[in-house]
Image: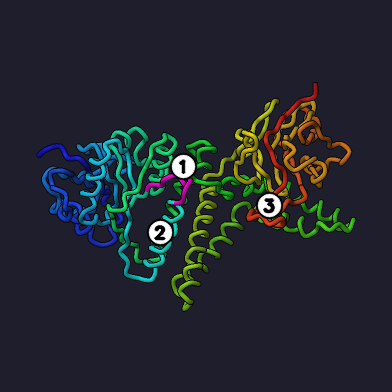
Amino acid sequence: MSTPLITVLVPLIDARGDAAEHISSWTRGQSLARERYQVIVAAPPGEEEMRRRVSEILGEGDELIVVHEEGLSLYDAAAAQAEADWLLPTESHCLGARDCLAEIVAAIERDPGLEAMTLEHGHVTSTAVDRQCARWFGDVYDIWRQPGEWKRLNLVGFAIRRELYLAEGGLDGRFGLFSSFVLGARLDRRGVPIPHLASARVDHVHTHGIRAHHDHAAEHAYRECDARTVFDTEFCERYFGYSHTWGNAARFRAEVARPTALALARSLLRGARRHEHALADLGRELLGWIGPALGGVRPHLAARKLRFLATELAADRLPLPVEVKFEQFMQALHEISELTQLRWIREHADPRLAALSESGRRTIGELEGVLVATHGLESHEGQAFRWTEPACSMQIRTPERGGELRVRTGGLRGAPLDYVRDVYVGARRVARDRLREEDEGTLVIPLPRAPGRRRAVPISVICEPLLPARDGSLDSRRLGLPVFSLELAAVA
């Protein structure tokens, strides 16, 4: 047999029916000459009967391997055995259209410089939930194909040069269902153009059950959290977006939330005594902090679980109009993602608190976990910054002889003392006349002496909220301080 041009990689898991029937769409159902491609099926231990049935439909040059090595993805195990220069990773519940491989080969022959391509994804549906899933996929793909979007890869099927696949880490087993997103992001960072080949179609068999679909959504969200611990923050936010829940994981720790909740409560009482018109704003902020202040992540987990179960029930079982059921289906996907992130946060709680402890300036990229209650990374005149929420917390290890904390805002919101309501260092409110400003809108907060052993002290900053939506913006966030850097300075 001559060397094949393309190898189809199939993991023998999550068959959703007869895996042998699905895989036969590759081994027996393609119009491309059989000697021009190869199929490698990688299976975990067990499921001997399924492996036997799959073995019966494999052709000459094809292979079924059993993978025992823990942590190695079935895709990467299959890729290691591939003979072809091109790979097509897919799933055992997907079917290749008759001309799929022939169209890929034709595209490669037309343009020998191609390195990767996405394929057309069709759907095999039989239930109302299947149709909701297919509609959701269609909406997602429409977003992915908009100008300026980076090219995502999907485990339903894509084609890539084997050499490039291996060079960029393959479909890393650590990231499960999220591994194709990681590989796509790495390829984009590398500058690899990835055209879409609409004439090569792979059909996706859906789960036939909303809970199974949500289990897969949860797996995807969980592995995304894993990926965010491996890659740097700028890479993750560029490619995976900003996750407000995961990005503010420290907020769900009682020891972090409690001082800011108490600071908000005290500011609320002070405002009530002075009959200020800010009570509603302060009350709203307090509601966002009081749950984790009292019970850590558990109250949010419980609330999210109830919201998820309610929307899942509405999408699947209640006699609602089709459009309303689809809205609930979409909301359930959002809820299971948030719920999963909270579960990840609970399971990976670090007993140590991140704190700013060394003198000197730290840019916003160096303050992960130190500055809590923030929004996504942004850039102003080439410098990265984050907006905080109207109430934010900072963990600072105060110098033994006291010092200052300088919060550089770049003057994006004007003079900080015009919108900063209150600052608390630990449980003590900093008198207004002790706060000051320096050039470029830097807020300077005095720090008390910490004789003996230095400890992390929470600093809570409470601002009048900036609401871009009030001025007609589509930005619905509630903003506080724009923070470019923090600088800790000890008393000279």
Give the mark nearest the N terminus, 1 or 3: 1
The magenta stretch is 146-153
Q: Are marks 1 and 2 in contact (CB under 8 Å)?
A: no
Task: Residue at 46% x, 51% y: name it.
Answer: 146
Q: Secondary structure at mark 1?
A: helix
Q: Looking at the image, can residue 87 be seen?
A: yes
Query: Is residue 36 positioned above or below 303 on the image?
Result: above
Work out how far the residue at label 1 is from the one at label 3, CA to CA, in angstroms.
28 Å
Work out how far the residue at label 1 is from the one at label 2, CA to CA, in angstroms.
23 Å
Question: Where residue 27 sits in the image (x, y, percent)?
Answer: 17, 51
Observer-nearest of 122 and 217: 122
Q: Looking at the image, can residue 353 be seen?
A: no
Taking 305 as reference, is 371 left or right?
right
Which residue, as the protein is rendered here, is positioned at the far front? 110
Label at residue 293: 3
Task: Residue at 27% x, 45% y: name it.
Answer: 88
> Few, some or many C-alpha atoms within 10 Å of disc 1 (few <14, some 14-19, many ≥20)?
some
Taking 141 as reference, is 297 left or right?
right
Q: Secondary structure at mark 2?
A: helix
Work out how far the residue at label 2 is from the one at label 3, CA to CA, in angstroms.
38 Å
Give the mark nearest the N terminus, 1 or 2: 2
Q: Quadrant of the N terminus?
A: top left
Residue that label 1 marks: 227
Q: Quadrant of the C terminus?
A: top right
Residue that label 2 marks: 137
- Magenta stretch mostly in which secondary structure? loop
Question: Residue 25: within the magenta?
Answer: no
The quarter holding residue 62 reads top left
Q: Secondary structure at mark 3?
A: helix
Question: Residue 148: within the magenta?
Answer: yes
> Few, some or many C-alpha atoms within 10 Å of disc 2 (few <14, some 14-19, many ≥20)?
some
Look at the image and name its color scheme: rainbow
